[in-house]
């Protein structure tokens, strides 16, 4: 159920079917190397959420495209808003979702830089009485490491989309201890499985995606966990080895896995009949 596709009289039924759950895809606009579009994070978040909602029906809110990208001002295509505006925009959007009858709101995030922003936003909602609950979920990056772990856990047939040659590509990546992080093999796979026409595999070597190690001394003592100097290590807005061999079959597999994982999250939110009661109890303490 896509919010903007619904007619006014259809919303009551959407609330009933979704059991009051509305999910919002959250991403950003920022450079992803030269082989992926600047909208990669919001494009894959929205695509995966819509696929998950086909499995477990909920209402899908329009995309929140303007996530937190404080350090990406040196590259074209990025759009950066002030933290104050980001917070206020998210606050008012969630209030509007709730006013329309969806009292359980899930923010589906696909941009690492949004994690701190969303955590702070959700905590901020606890400082006022609200008749709704906001939670967040971060889409997991489906790297070759994760895919091979899934084979070990569920068997080769779990990755039924992949050929034996595809499995060898994954094994080669892992055996050589190649890196993933940003605009990497994992993100490239998700884009190949969702927006194939936007991916330029001929440009995967255009930029260096390995760390400069200029702030290694800060990394080693945990002073860069906030990503404050991420751009110093990765000035090309690209972290990872070139996604050699990545293809649409691998992408389709990654999209399916990510969608199924998210569908389970949506199912739990729909079936939970306690969180709104707990929220009311919290409100009564004021």
Image (spheres, grey):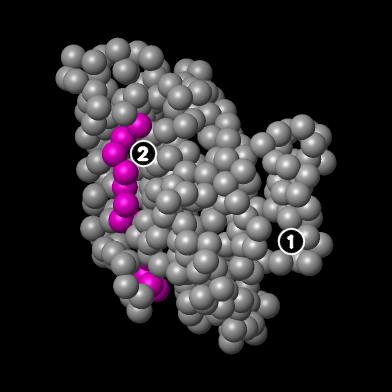
Query: Is 24 situated left or right of 194 in this image?
Result: left
**On the image, numbered disc 2 is attached to which residue?**
24
Residue 54 vs 156, above or below: the answer is above
Q: Is residue 270 visible?
A: yes
Specify which label sits upstream in the sequence, 1 or 2.
2
Check the image and name the residue furthest to the bottom. 214
Check the image and name the residue furthest to the left. 8
Q: Which residues are magenta?
A: 60-72
Q: Are marks 1 and 2 in contact (CB under 8 Å)?
A: no
Choose between 286 and 51: the one closer to the eye: 51
- Badge 1 marks a residue whose secondary structure is helix
- Residue 66 lies in magenta, yes or no? yes
**Number of other residues with Cα within 10 Å of mark 1, as a class: few under 14, some 14 to 19, many 20 or more:** many
Query: Is 89 situated left or right of 166 in this image?
Result: left
| Mark 1 or mark 2, whichever is nearer to me | 1
Query: Is 139 situated left or right of 103 in this image?
Result: right
Residue 274 vs 286, above or below: the answer is above
Q: Which mark is residue 204?
A: none
Residue located 37% across and 56% down the image = 39
**On the image, numbered disc 1 is attached to which residue?**
173
Residue located 74% across and 61% down the image = 173
Choose between 227 and 111: the one closer to the eye: 111
């Amino acid at each position: 159920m896509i919010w903007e596709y619904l007619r006014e009289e259809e919303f009551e039924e959407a609330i009933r079917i979704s059991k009051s759950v509305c999910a919002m895809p959250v991403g950003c606009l920022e450079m992803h190397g030269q082989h992926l579009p600047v909208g990669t994070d919001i494009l894959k978040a929205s695509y995966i959420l819509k696929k998950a909602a086909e499995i477990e029906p909920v209402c899908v809110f329009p995309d929140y495209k303007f996530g937190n990208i404080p350090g990406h001002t040196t590259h074209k295509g990025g759009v950066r808003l002030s933290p104050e505006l980001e917070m206020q925009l998210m606050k008012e959007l969630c209030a509007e979702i709730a006013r329309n009858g969806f009292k359980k709101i899930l923010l589906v995030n696909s941009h690492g830089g949004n994690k701190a922003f969303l955590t702070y936003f959700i905590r901020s909602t606890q400082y006022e009485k609200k008749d709704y609950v906001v939670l967040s979920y971060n889409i997991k990056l489906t790297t070759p490491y994760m895919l091979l772990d899934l084979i070990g856990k569920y068997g080769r047939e779990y990755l039924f989309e992949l050929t034996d040659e595809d499995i060898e590509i994954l094994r080669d990546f892992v055996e050589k201890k190649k890196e993933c992080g940003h605009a990497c093999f994992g993100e490239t796979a998700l884009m190949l499985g969702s927006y194939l026409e936007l991916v330029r595999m001929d440009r995967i070597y255009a930029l260096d995606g390995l760390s400069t190690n200029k702030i290694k001394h800060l990394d080693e003592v945990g002073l860069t966990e906030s990503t404050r100097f991420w751009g110093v290590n990765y000035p090309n807005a690209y972290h990872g080895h070139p996604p050699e061999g990545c293809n649409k079959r691998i992408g389709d597999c990654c999209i399916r896995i990510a969608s199924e994982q998210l569908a389970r999250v949506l199912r739990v939110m729909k079936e939970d009949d306690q969180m709104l009661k707990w929220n009311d109890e919290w409100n009564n303490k004021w």
